[in-house]
Image (cartoon, rainbow, N blue to C red):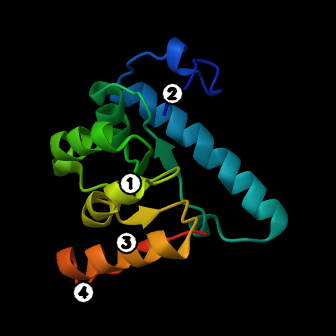
Amino acid sequence: MAFRADGGMSSVTEQQTISAADARTKLARIQDQIDAVTEEIGVFADAVRVVGASKAQPLATIRAFAEAGIKACGENYLQEAISKLDELKQYEMEWHFIGHIQSNKAKQVAERFAWVQTLDSTRLAKRLNDARLVSHPDEPLNCCI
């Protein structure tokens, strides 16, 4: 979710906190691009989901995007993510874990995230599944391979 003023992505070193109004403008620009591409290829735009990557972003920036309407957020630092999930509960965002998961962190990921974007072993899949069945028995953990 680090966007430059021109709409491009910025590196972590360039990050700034932005207002909800600026976040709305940036999300509208992204949605316009999604609409154009999906129309061109004949796919419904609502089949595309925007997931904001919050890696190393301040809470204020994530909050601005949540207030602007972003519904899904991705994180790849578990400890950083836990504090963000706790601080941003009121927005009811869908959280995605992005990146490699150390097996000793599988339980926390399974308990706290709706999606795992990078499932890379059957051993990890089993650990995630076992932990999810305990913490959320009626809610599957969505995984990308």
- Asked which quadrant contains residue 39, the reply is bottom right
- For label 3, the residue is 128
Q: Is residue 4 left or right of residue 42?
A: left
Q: Return the residue nearer the eye: 130 or 14.
A: 130
Determine the residue positioned at 38% across, 28% down: 21
Residue to which mark 2 is pinned: 2
- Residue lying at the far bottom of the rendered structure: 138
Q: Which mark is residue 123?
A: none
* Local SS, label 3: helix
Q: Which mark lies nearer to you, 2 or 3?
A: 3
Residue 101: percent from the left, percent from the top? 45, 54
Q: Nearer the viewer, residue 99 or 14?
A: 99
Q: Residue at x 66, y 71 (%)?
A: 44
The label number, if any, that marks residue 138 in the structure image: 4
> Please, what is the three-letter code of the amino acid marked with disc 4?
Asp
Q: CA distance from mark 1 to mark 2?
A: 16 Å
Neighbor class of circle 4 (other Cα within 10 Å; few <14, some 14-19, many 20+) is few
Q: To which residue does mark 1 refer?
A: 71
**Vertical side of 37 occupied by 61: above or below:** above
Q: Nearer the viewer, mark 4 or mark 2?
A: 4
Give the distance between the C-alpha atoms of the residues marked 2 and 3, in whole angstroms.
29 Å
User: Is label 4 or label 1 in front?
Assistant: 4
